[in-house]
Amino acid sequence: MAESNSTQTPEEAAPQSIGLVNLVVETLYSLAARPEGSSIRAIAQETGNSRSSTHRILQYLAKSGYAEQTENGSYVVGSRLVSLSARVFGVVPVLQIARSIMRRLVDEVGETCYLATYLPGDNFCTYVHRVESANLVRHVQPLGVRLPLHAGAVGKAILTALPDFDFSKLELVPFTVHTLTTEAALQQGLELVRSKGYAVSVEERVLGIAGVASVLKSEDIVVGALTVSVPLSRVSPPDLDEIGRAVKAHADELSSALTGIGVTRI
């Protein structure tokens, strides 16, 4: 084996490693100072680093979840850094964490994402936040509207995680010809949701629109769901499973963050 050409001793290499760590920390401080986003040039100037080195650091931080690149190319703090700060200082920036994770989900699947909240014992859930896709054709649903649990993917995702739920309390009102309006049909649909880990609905609440959703939990407490709304003109029902797996992965990440910071309501 050829010998290394490096003549550095551990003592000589250590200052270089410390210097790199300092640059990473200063980069994070620079990101945190501008919640609206900061360019590579601005961060390089603030940290005294080269633009190429700053770019590499930001790429690594983004890959690790500590930074996030926005649509205009600037960088902001990522969900893992926000979650870390919440654990250390007791801050609970729930929507900031959720928005970051939702943005990455939208970038991955190309469809609009919604955050729904759920309160124990309720028969409804509520959309409280939305991150829209860049598609010209998209179905935008209003925030703040109470959605019945029996109609649509988001409700079914929540119901699967409520083992003691009293289904007799539900008013199985039809919204379309595809709405599940009997308890037997609903229970059968929930079995499929449990096997996959995410819920899929096709025109159950709005004609021409499919939904994909996965439950959000803090420890064992159901707090809501993450859902994606998809116009059927752009995707066929068999392709919804691929979106479902992505939704579940991001919902699991958000659930982990909610558990870590002790949030039981969003």
Image (spheres, rainbow, N blue to C red):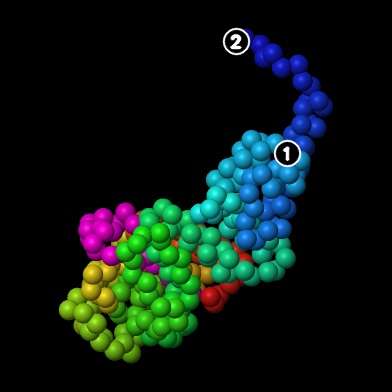
Q: Residues within 10 Å of mark 2 (few under 14, many from 20)?
A: few
User: Distance between the Cα atoms at labels 1 and 2?
Assistant: 36 Å
Residue 161 x/y as whole percent: 40, 72
The question of residue 140 being in magenta is answered with no
Task: Tell me: 185 left or right of 67.
Answer: left
Q: Is any part of residue 110 visible from this angle?
A: yes
At 65% across and 61% down in the image, what residue appears?
35
Q: Residue furthest top?
A: 2
Work out whether mark 1 precedes mark 2 in sequence or the reverse, and give the earlier one. 2
Task: Tell me: 172 left or right of 63.
Answer: left
Label at residue 1: 2
Q: What segment is highlighted magenta in the picture?
A: 223-243
Residue 125 x/y as whole percent: 41, 80
Determine the image quadrant of residue 243.
bottom left
Q: Residue furthest right?
A: 11
Label at residue 49: 1
| Amino acid carrying mark 1 in the image | Asn
